[in-house]
Image (tube, rainbow, N blue to C red):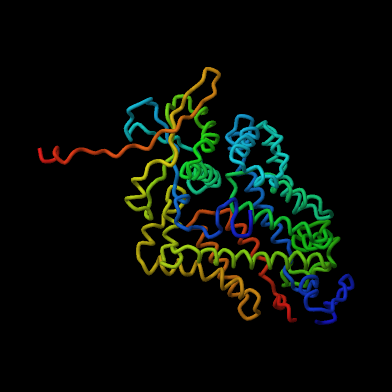
Amino acid sequence: MTHFDADGLPLSFAVSDRSEKNHLLQQSTKSRGETEEDWTAIENSAMAGSDRQRRWQRFLAAIAELGNNEQTALAAWLVEPLAIANPEAKKIRITRQPDLMTTVVDDSASAPYAAAIVRQENGSVRLVQLPPPRMAAKSRGEDRE
Amino acid sequence: MSDASVNTEQPVLSSAWLKFWFHAEPGTQSLFAIRVGLSLIACWYFASHWVDAGTWFSANGILATERLGDFLDAGDLADDAKWRVSPLYLISSTTALHCYLAMGIMLAIAAVMVRTSRVPAILLWLWCLWLANRSLLIAGPEELALVFGLAYLTIPKPDDTRLCFKRGLTLSGKARNTMKNDLPPKGQTPFKTEPSHWTHALASRLLQVHMALLLAATGLTMLASKIWWDGTGSVSIVAPIGRRVFDFTDLLTSPWIHESITHAIVVVPIAASIMVWLPATRLHAYLAAMIWCVVLALLSSQWMYLATIVVLLQCFNTTSEPATLDR
């Protein structure tokens, strides 16, 4: 913590980087073959703009930043208690919500962190990182047909 | 300086530098208003942790001590966090955490009410600091401003501020009778009493210098990002509407509105950090900085941080002569 930032958060209020976006924690109860609709948000009860919500968002932003920097093992340390707290979840991920300042490219980017949850008999969990979704492709010949 | 303002408790200070830091002039803003304001914000800070204290810090919490230690070790971050000392790392019970928060609120009240000793002020500062240190990954600028503000309030000699307190309240009964002779003349603002000790002046000066640096740093840091040059800074602040109390995105669609607000947000803190030291412009700079805080609070929903800054800016709300070194 310095005069110029506090826990890495600059005092400048906004620099329009990805950490400032609204982050969502989502879960899927399907083990495989899920679609976007199968992901549901794990809501935090804090009111928008409250101190409680700000702390929650800082925490999610820290995980997303670790995921973006390919520090997924570290991100898993932080996600683990969230996975334990949601026993019905088979997969868990953190996404950024699009807003006025995001472009189509930003909005189409894959989730900064996504993992499958492997539950152990003793109640602990292991998180296995999910690969980013592949781009759909088909041959040009199919279009002509 | 008039004869009436000469105080026997003040050392004879020859150089302008020493006078700047240690000479408590008549009319210098009492720190009482700042103390009350920061104590209220400290109550707010502790209360805001109440619901989630167990969720974050308990034995099974998201930031449980053991888990956090493993995380820091795994990330080779232990060195970065070694100064974040806090006894809260030893507490894992939600009930004990709630007791800590309740004691923090009581200390915030005591720091205003008990002015015969520095102990409540020092304890309140430590209580906030320890909670801020424990809030690894979830702390922000509000902790920074609150903790340094409370640290400076531990400096003034207690008797001095107690006098201000009694003069300021003058409620009724015994306190009114016993302090009758100490009351300021009719019509004079009770908080603007004459500080009698150099520690009062030192605390005020440290706050003033720190606040001027904070304003300058905030404005100059903005210049590092292009959004504060191209006029979209204010839109960037309001854009994550899921984290905002008010949605100003429609209001800011007009380019001249969001560009004007963006440039004002950058210019005001930089200009104010200099203008608060000049006698002719100090009041304007102080008022502009207050408006800046209100606008930013509405746009960014960072209520606690900006409320703390508003309280700390009261150190410039003074009727005394300008706080320059060449007097």
Residue A12 is situated, as x and y percent measured from the top left of the image, at: 53, 60
In this view, B62 is above or below B225: above
Residue visible at 39% across and 30% down in the picture: A28
Rendered position, B18 above or below B313: below
Percent of width and height locating residue B235: 41, 59
Q: Quadrant of the N terminus of chain B?
A: bottom right
Question: Total marks drawn?
Answer: 0
Residue with the most extreme top position:
A121
Residue drawn where x is 63% and y is 53% of the image? A1
Q: Position of residue B185 (x, y in %)?
A: 77, 72
Residue B316 in the image: above or below residue A32: below
On-image quarter of the C terminus of chain B: bottom right
Question: Residue drawn 71% across and 42% down?
Answer: B86
User: In the picture, residue B149 is in which quadrant?
Assistant: bottom right
Q: In this view, does B177 lie above or below B49?
A: below
Residue A143 drawn at (x, y percent): 14, 40
Residue lying at the far right in this picture: please name it: B8
Task: Out of B305 and B37, give the one closest to the viewer.
Answer: B305
Give the side of residue A142 with respect to residue A83, left or right: left
In the rendered view, does A130 fall on the left or right side of B201? left
> In the displayed structure, does residue B168 sit left or right of residue B9?
left
